[in-house]
Image (cartoon, helix red, strand yellow):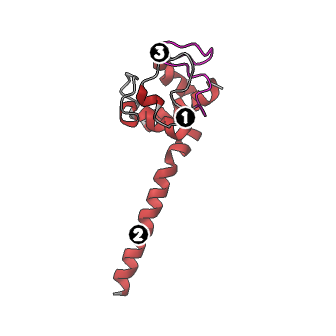
Amino acid sequence: MKLARFSVVALGALGLAIGVAGAVAPAAAAEGGDPAHGRTVAARCLACHDLNTGATRLGPSLKGVIGRKAGSLPGYAYSDAMKSSGVTWTPDTLDTYLKSPTTYVKGTKMAFAGLPDAKDRADVIAYLQQATK
């Protein structure tokens, strides 16, 4: 009985540790991202987004995106879903959004399937942190 009780406790602790590690992984990935590679990956974003001037294109400008409330940039016609999402763009929320925009904000206008590779997302986020201040 003692062994069985220990096993349950040990498995519970292991599950908690894995859950905590998974929760901090996006932030850790973004912090360790390679901005030079992120610039290459983000080149496809430039077809719709401006990074530096604040100009609106097919998509909103990404200048100052980190820390900005989603759907709040004046001059861009956001979807109702984005305006009411309650999201503030942080490395973590960008990581989740860039993985699958239509899953994270159902009803978004962003016509992009997403970046399935976690390293690509971390690199893009590292680049955005540098390039869009």
Dominant SS in magenta:
loop
Tell which circle, 3 or 1, labels the residue nearer the N-terminal end. Answer: 3
Residue in view at x 45 percent, y 63 percent:
16
Q: Secondary structure at mark 2?
A: helix
Furthest residue toward bottom: 1
What amino acid is labelled 3 in the image? Cys
Q: Residues within 10 Å of mark 2 (few under 14, many from 20)?
A: few
Q: Secondary structure at mark 1?
A: loop
Q: Which residue is mark 1?
A: 89
Q: How far, Cα to Cα, is label 2 from label 1?
A: 33 Å
Q: How far, Cα to Cα, is label 2 from label 3?
A: 46 Å
Q: Which residue is mark 2?
A: 12
- Which region is colored magenta? 50-68
Image location of residue 18, percent across then percent down: 44, 58
The answer to whether residue 12 is seen in the rendering is yes
Of residue 122 and residue 65, the one placed in the foreground of this image is: 65
Q: Which residue is mark 3?
A: 48
Please check the rendered image and state whether residue 66 is part of the magenta-colored stretch, yes or no.
yes
What amino acid is labelled 1 in the image? Trp
Residue in view at x 63 percent, y 14 percent:
53
The reply to whether discs 3 and 1 touch (Cβ–Cβ < 8 Å) is no
Query: Is 115 displayed left or right of 71 in the figure?
Result: left
Tell which circle, 2 or 3, labels the residue nearer the N-terminal end. Answer: 2
What amino acid is labelled 2 in the image? Gly
Q: How far, Cα to Cα, is label 3 from label 1?
A: 18 Å
Tell which circle, 2 or 1, labels the residue nearer the N-terminal end. Answer: 2
Query: Is 54 displayed left or right of 45 in the figure?
Result: right
The reply to whether discs 2 and 3 touch (Cβ–Cβ < 8 Å) is no
Residue in view at x 50 percent, y 43 percent:
26
